[in-house]
Image (cartoon, rainbow, N blue to C red):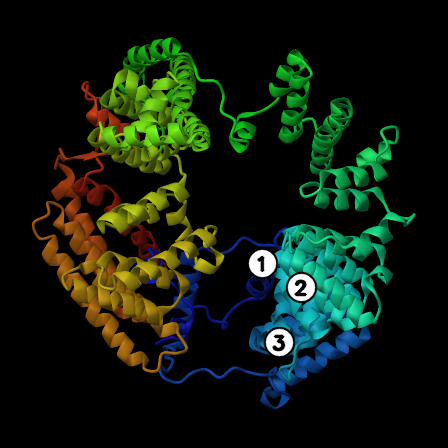
């Protein structure tokens, strides 16, 4: 096999539609050589960048060179290429090359740089594997022409020829930093992280960390800085940079460990103080008090002799553990340099257990006429002080003034607003109280467990009747014609019909209907929460009255467990959607609303509402409508999945698909998601550089866990094999596909995947016997082709499948560099397709494919039977119209080859 076979291959490259060619360094002119060496470097620079040759042009040049040579280069399949540790030795140079190098050196020393460059390029043309010409070219462009961009390019070529030249890698990295090419600097610094003895190169590691910081890549910077900090735990610069990055990413636990390590190494009390503050932030009160005691013991002194911030931290931590440090409190009280922030933190820790003493500490720092004391107080501290004022002194005026000042600084703080409204309500200032409560948002209400007043039953009934009457008109306007269908519906058209005035009017009416629907349904779904709130209050009251509690329990035993929920809901006068229109009509209304929200591009709102409905119905306690409720819950779960798929909310969709697999053992939904949308596009590249790397890695872990529970599931084995292929783990992929083929020996896809991975494994360094893998690959490929042929014999377009088999076999021959077999197979494939043109030209396919999207799914269920299927995308027509074009793409390449060479390959 040729040498390029052993290079890394992307997953399933055997099935790519473009063959991989071979590059030779012989018979290349100076202009082509300059473009080859410096093309990527000069992109975006000056005007020396030339356009790249097409694949066909490169392939023709290669064949012409091969014809002149008259021989074919054949590489050994067993002998591995040794890694060259140094540049080409002078002893290996021919006398002519030595003479040229001497001439280039002479030109360089004499200042004839143009002649030196010309001579060096001639050396490169004759011996492109030498290190010294590239290095000297870089030196000339850097020092004499002051062209660091070109110099960096030549240095990179020299460095790749001598991988162990660490100083050269470092120089390139520093030049790249100066040029602002941080990515290239990172790449070069990674090449010199260890010296020739295998020891860490600390200077390069630190420079790499600085590059990561320049890119705002703090996680990677933290890894490098933490490695250096472990080697030098007393380095203040490392501590500063590491703490800064850890603070940005919010990793307080690691930051605390770093500060404590630095203190252990240096005894720096500033680091100890910062560690104490972090422990208080993390609510590690016991650890904080122990750490302060440890510092005092290490210094052989008392706690009151430590710096003031550490004494305050010790007092706060002890107060939170219900221990009052009398000595330390007395010491802080008598100090003159105590800041208001310190006093407020002590008072806050004391407020719950002793509001009287806490108020004294608040008064020690608070001055209503001093704005600095107000600015030093946090919202939580102000709330506690106001509560202490009301509890201890009944001083609502001072509390109101304090909260008013804090609200000027934080006007949207919900806790301040509610406490201020309560105080105003107690003082009879109802208008101001209502005005304050009007600032609260729905998020604030949900967080504070405050539920808005329900819509009146009469208004609910009227709104629901309007929604039911208007929905049929909207459905007819939106779905009767396919020109308004949005992507990713298969019926969608690219003729901009959705930008017309007619559709804009329809869309406006649809959005108005959706707004009214969301308002009424969201309010009705809050009835469950309202009922449970009332239940918790009633339960607390009954527990205080033993007689009432006993009577209630006896009554509940008689009528059933759901008595309390239904009775409370009835007492509150709440009628939800299912109570007004019934479960069946509610389910139908939800389906129609979901389709309209998908049509209007409001999938996210729809998924949120459906999730709320599903959660509430799971909490709904009633034995009277259990069958209808379960049926509706199943429908809602299905709507969530389809709407999230339609709107591209893949995390929600994957969660439901996984749940479906766990419950039913069917992986169809999950596999369909992985094979569509952004996840499918991301799978075309290597997993390490994928745009959806995190999502794919998380799903790979889930598949691995499921395989432990179901090791013989064919679908799981295939998905696991695909993930291993994306990662380039050919041995693991082979094992998964082999197990899958054992489960279904007649599955041609599993056999083809197994064959492809045997071909890919030829580039792996761990493969011991390449010949065996070639034999196995060809055997399974032939087996898959036979299975494919048997399964498509009765298909109306079976000839196209035959061409597909020829194409796959040709790609296999091409992969192992057997072009004398591959090219005839390609030509036969193309000839087969062309012969089928006349045969299938008059065939009319009446098959129709049903679109699986949420809109078409609702249209199928509708009584009107709106359009929901598409012609021309059924299996037979799809094979002919699309796979035929895919195969014909190779014809242009080989036609160009045969015309330019004047002979058949």
**Reading the chain from its start, which is encountered first: label 1 or label 2?**
1
Where does the image place residue 748, in percent across and percent down from the top left?
18, 59
Q: Give 791 or 396, whichever is nearer the viewer.
A: 396
User: What is the quadrant of residue 625 in the picture?
Assistant: top left
In this rendering, the count of numbered labels is: 3
| Residue 72 in view here | yes
Determine the CA span between mark 3 and mark 1: 21 Å
Residue depicted at 39% across the width and 48% down the height: 679
Secondary structure found at label 3: helix
Give the class, few, some or many, for how many residues have Cα within 10 Å of label 3's Cα (few <14, many ≥20).
many
Q: Give 200 or 816, whichever is nearer the viewer.
A: 200
Q: Which residue is mark 1?
A: 40
The numbered dot on residue 123 is 3
Determine the CA span between mark 2 and mark 3: 57 Å
Q: Would residue 81 appear left or right of 829 to someone viewing this image?
A: right
List the single residue furthest toward the bottom: 91
Please determine whether, in this image, residue 805 is positioned above or below residue 404: below
**Reading the chain from its start, which is encountered first: label 2 or label 3?**
3
Q: Would residue 806 appear left or right of 511 to someone viewing this image?
A: left
């Amino acid at each position: 096999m040729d040498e390029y076979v052993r290079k890394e291959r992307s997953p399933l490259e055997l099935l790519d539609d473009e063959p991989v060619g071979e590059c030779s360094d012989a018979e290349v002119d100076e202009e082509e050589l300059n473009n080859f060496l410096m093309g990527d470097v000069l992109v975006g620079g000056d005007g020396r960048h030339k356009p790249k040759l097409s694949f066909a042009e490169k392939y023709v040049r290669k064949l012409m060179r091969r014809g002149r040579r008259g021989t074919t280069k054949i590489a050994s399949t067993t002998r591995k290429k040794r890694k060259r540790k140094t540049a080409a030795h002078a002893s290996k140079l021919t006398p002519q090359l030595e003479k040229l190098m001497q001439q280039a050196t002479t030109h360089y020393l004499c200042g004839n740089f143009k002649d030196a460059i010309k001579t060096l390029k001639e050396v490169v043309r004759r011996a492109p594997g030498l290190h010294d010409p590239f290095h000297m070219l870089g030196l000339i462009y850097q020092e004499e022409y002051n062209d660091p961009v070109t110099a960096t390019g030549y240095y990179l070529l020299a460095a790749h020829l001598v991988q162990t030249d660490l100083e050269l890698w470092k120089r390139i990295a520093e030049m790249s930093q100066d040029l602002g090419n941080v990515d290239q600097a990172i790449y070069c610094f990674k090449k010199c992280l260890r010296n020739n003895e295998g020891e860490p190169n600390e200077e390069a590691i630190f420079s790499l960390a600085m590059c990561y910081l320049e890119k705002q890549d703090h996680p990677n910077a933290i890894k490098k800085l933490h490695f250096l900090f472990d080697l030098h735990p007393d380095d203040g610069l490392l501590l500063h940079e590491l703490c800064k990055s850890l603070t940005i990413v919010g990793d307080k636990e690691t930051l605390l460990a770093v500060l404590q390590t630095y203190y252990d190494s240096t005894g720096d009390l500033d680091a100890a103080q910062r560690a104490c503050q972090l422990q208080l932030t993390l609510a590690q009160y016991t650890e904080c008090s122990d750490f302060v005691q440890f510092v005092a013991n290490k210094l052989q002194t008392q706690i009151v002799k430590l710096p003031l911030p550490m004494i305050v931290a010790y007092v706060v931590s002890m107060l939170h553990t219900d221990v009052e440090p009398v000595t330390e409190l007395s010491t802080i009280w008598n100090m003159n340099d105590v800041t208001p922030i310190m006093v407020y933190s002590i008072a806050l820790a004391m407020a719950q257990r002793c509001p009287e003493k806490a108020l004294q500490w608040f008064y020690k720092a608070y001055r209503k006429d001093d704005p600095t004391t107000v600015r030093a107080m946090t919202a939580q501290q102000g709330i506690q002080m106001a509560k202490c004022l009301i509890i201890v002194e009944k001083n609502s005026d001072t509390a109101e003034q304090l909260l008013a000042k804090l609200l000027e600084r934080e006007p949207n703080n919900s806790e301040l607003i509610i406490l201020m409204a309560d105080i105003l309500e107690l003082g009879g200032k109802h208008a101001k109280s209502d005005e304050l409560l009007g600032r609260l948002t729905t998020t604030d209400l949900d967080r504070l467990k405050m539920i808005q007043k329900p819509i009146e039953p009469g208004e609910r009934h009227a709104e629901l009747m309007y929604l039911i009457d208007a929905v049929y008109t909207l459905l007819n306007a939106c779905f009767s014609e396919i020109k308004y269908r949005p992507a990713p519906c298969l019926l969608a058209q690219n003729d901009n019909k959705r930008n017309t005035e007619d559709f804009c009017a329809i869309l406006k009416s649809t959005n108005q209907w959706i707004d009214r629907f969301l308002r009424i349904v969201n309010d009705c779904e809050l009835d469950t929460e309202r009922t449970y709130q009332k239940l918790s209050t009633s339960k607390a009251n009954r527990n205080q009255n033993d007689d009432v509690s006993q009577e209630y329990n006896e009554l509940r035993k008689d009528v059933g467990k759901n008595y309390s929920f239904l009775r409370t809901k009835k007492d509150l006068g709440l009628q939800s959607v299912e109570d007004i229109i019934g479960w069946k009509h509610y389910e139908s209304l939800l389906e129609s609303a979901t389709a309209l929200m998908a049509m209007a591009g409001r999938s996210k709102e729809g998924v949120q509402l459906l999730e709320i409905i599903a959660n509430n119905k799971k909490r709904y306690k009633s034995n009277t409508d259990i069958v209808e409720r379960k049926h509706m819950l199943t429908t809602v779960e299905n709507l969530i999945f389809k709407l999230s798929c339609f709107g591209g909310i893949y995390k929600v969709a994957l969660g439901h698909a996984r749940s479906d697999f766990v419950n039913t053992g069917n992986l169809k939904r999950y596999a369909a998601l992985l094979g569509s949308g952004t996840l499918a596009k991301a799978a075309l590249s290597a997993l390490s550089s994928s745009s959806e790397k995190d999502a794919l890695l998380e799903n790979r872990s889930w598949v691995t866990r499921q395989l432990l529970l179901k090791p013989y599931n064919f679908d799981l084995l295939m998905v696991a094999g695909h993930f291993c292929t994306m990662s380039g783990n050919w041995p693991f992929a082979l094992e998964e596909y082999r197990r899958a083929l054992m489960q279904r020996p007649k599955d041609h896809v599993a056999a083809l995947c197994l064959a492809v991975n045997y071909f890919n494994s030829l580039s792996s360094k761990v493969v011991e016997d390449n010949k065996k893998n070639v034999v196995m690959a060809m055997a399974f490929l032939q087996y898959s082709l036979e299975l494919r042929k048997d399964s498509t014999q009765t298909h109306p377009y079976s000839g196209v499948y035959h061409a597909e088999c020829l194409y796959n076999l040709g790609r296999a021959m091409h992969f192992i560099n057997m072009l004398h077999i591959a090219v005839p197979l390609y030509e036969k494939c193309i000839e087969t397709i062309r012969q089928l043109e006349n045969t299938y030209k008059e065939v009319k396919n009446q098959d129709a494919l049903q679109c699986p999207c949420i809109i078409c799914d609702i249209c199928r269920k509708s009584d009107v039977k709106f359009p929901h299927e598409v012609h021309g995308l059924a299996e037979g027509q799809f094979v002919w119209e699309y796979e035929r074009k895919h195969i014909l793409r190779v014809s242009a390449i080989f036609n160009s080859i045969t015309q330019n060479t004047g002979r058949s390959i």
